[in-house]
Amino acid sequence: MKNTTVSISDNKTASNAEIKQGLSEITLKDLLGFTLFNTAELAGLFSDIMNTSQTSGPMDFALMRFIALFCGACMYIFLAHFKGRDELVRSRSCIAVACLLQLVLPSFVLLELYANLSISIVVIGFSWMLWGFAHSYLYCAWVDARSSLDDQVASKMNLWAFCATAVFVTVVLWLPGEVAAYTLIAALILSAAFLLVDASRKRKLTESCEKPVEEKSNEAEESADEASLEFEAVGSYNLVVIGIIISFSAGLLITGSFLHDFPVAFIGIAIMLSTLLFCLVKKLCPAALAFGFTLRILFPITVVSLALMTFLRGPIIEVISFILFSFLYLIDMANLSNLSMRGAILYISPALCFAKGRIYIVIGQAVGWLTVLFYYYFYSSEVWLRPFFTSALLLLMAIYIMLGAIGQLRRNMRGEGTEEIADVSGIEIASSQEADQVKHQPYKTRCLAASKQYGLTQREAEILTYLAKGRNAKYIAQQLYVAERTVKTHAYHIYQKMNIHSQQELIDIVEDLA
């Protein structure tokens, strides 16, 4: 078998203490900036803070959100296929421009409020387009900037950021409209400032720790493309359907405030409930956050909720939407958390990995808001047609089940998805104490080389990076939202392909690839 050699530059090598000190200095700022950024996004999309006199109705509200999310999906598609994406999301000038573009819309809101101007809905729609493009770009920039963090630190920061964002959003939505608009602008400016500072400092830290050869980026691109093709074939329609239902339930909840005086701040409480569920599940049973398992649990809730919406009327629909959104947004949080870490773990472009993973669910959310638009159109004109929308969503769920069953059947016929039958009794995974004793090393490049040398699959390569760092099965399962037995099964296959019998042998092989 052909040996793979990866050279690492020894210039500007930072010690472990210097790395930890640098990260500790920017972690709190990073957390605050990312929280403010998420707060601005959720408050802008799920409230009437940025409504004007031309967009104050339920239909206009839904139309503007559709425009923003559709443009956001287009930006993700662009970043997923643009070869210079990493340089683009790290550009200080581009980050500053994107921040200014996001400020256009709230500035128009304040201008109309104080100058008594009636801004055209076309101008407002164009402002929402800019918001969507800029937000998706900045999210990729945030993910890239945080990719230098250790995976354990990044996981905790995601959890803290979700909790803080839920609280911030709830507070902002209770504020008066004028104060909320000022708060939104301040959050955007501060988050952009933190992003500019942190992205620059973390890039310097990364360059001082590891200086890979130029060939690595090309290999990473090819590996990422292979993984994305598998993702598109298996899970794209799942994410689209989930995105549609999330936006549909959120749209009924939010726009219902225009019709039944339903407090719009309840969307913040729904997000807080989703965060609480995320924290509890992640602590008690992380495997339950796996995409397929979560869908099986939430599917009955979705079907029952949509069926009830077909027959019920009045504010009770908003109550059902509150419950449905609270549970379904849990999937979106798990998706965001996983994608924000996946690129750094696999040592591929974090922006590429995140963009490819977010395209479909954002498209689904855009379609969901479009569905809300037509739903309220028939609400005010042809009421008897309203049940057809929820019935159509139920049909969509049925199609989703059918496609999921077909996809699983195909994977089983190819021999995938059956690894649980493997014998894992002989697998030795390091204990948590042993893991703490493993020295820090520029292991990601070596793991990439080892994965290619021994023909590991994309999931096996992902787990290899953890094993080479000395992590135990329980820790890996928590980070990847899978069962501990599944991790041991993948480890069994890795050991077979590498012809080894312990984790220490794996670490020795990876360390020798230098």
Image (cartoon, rainbow, N blue to C red):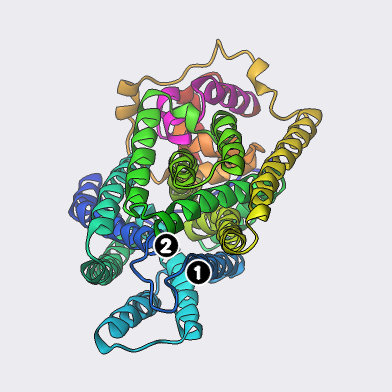
Which of 176/414 is in front? 176
Crowding at dot 1, Cα within 10 Å, few <14 / some 14-19 / many 20+, comes out as many
Q: Examine the image and state in which quarter residue 423 appears.
A: top right
Residue at 33% from the left image edge and 63% from the top image edge: 40
Q: Which residue is mark 2?
A: 45
Relative to 359, is 301 above or below?
Answer: above
Q: Can residue 437 be seen from the camera position used here?
A: no
Residue 312: percent from left, percent from top: 55, 41
Q: Is residue 479 magenta?
A: yes
Mark 1 vs 2: CB contact within 8 A: yes
Count of marks overlaid on the render: 2
Q: Disc 1 marks which amino acid?
A: Ala
Q: Examine the image and state in which quarter residue 285 appears.
A: top left
Residue 141: percent from left, percent from top: 41, 64
Residue 281: percent from left, percent from top: 40, 29
Q: Secondary structure at mark 1?
A: helix
Residue at 40% from the left image edge and 69% from the top image edge: 90
View extreme (top): residue: 425
Q: Which residue is mark 1?
A: 68
Q: Which residues are magenta?
A: 468-496
Q: Secondary structure at mark 2?
A: helix
Residue at 75% from the left image edge and 33% from the top image edge: 405
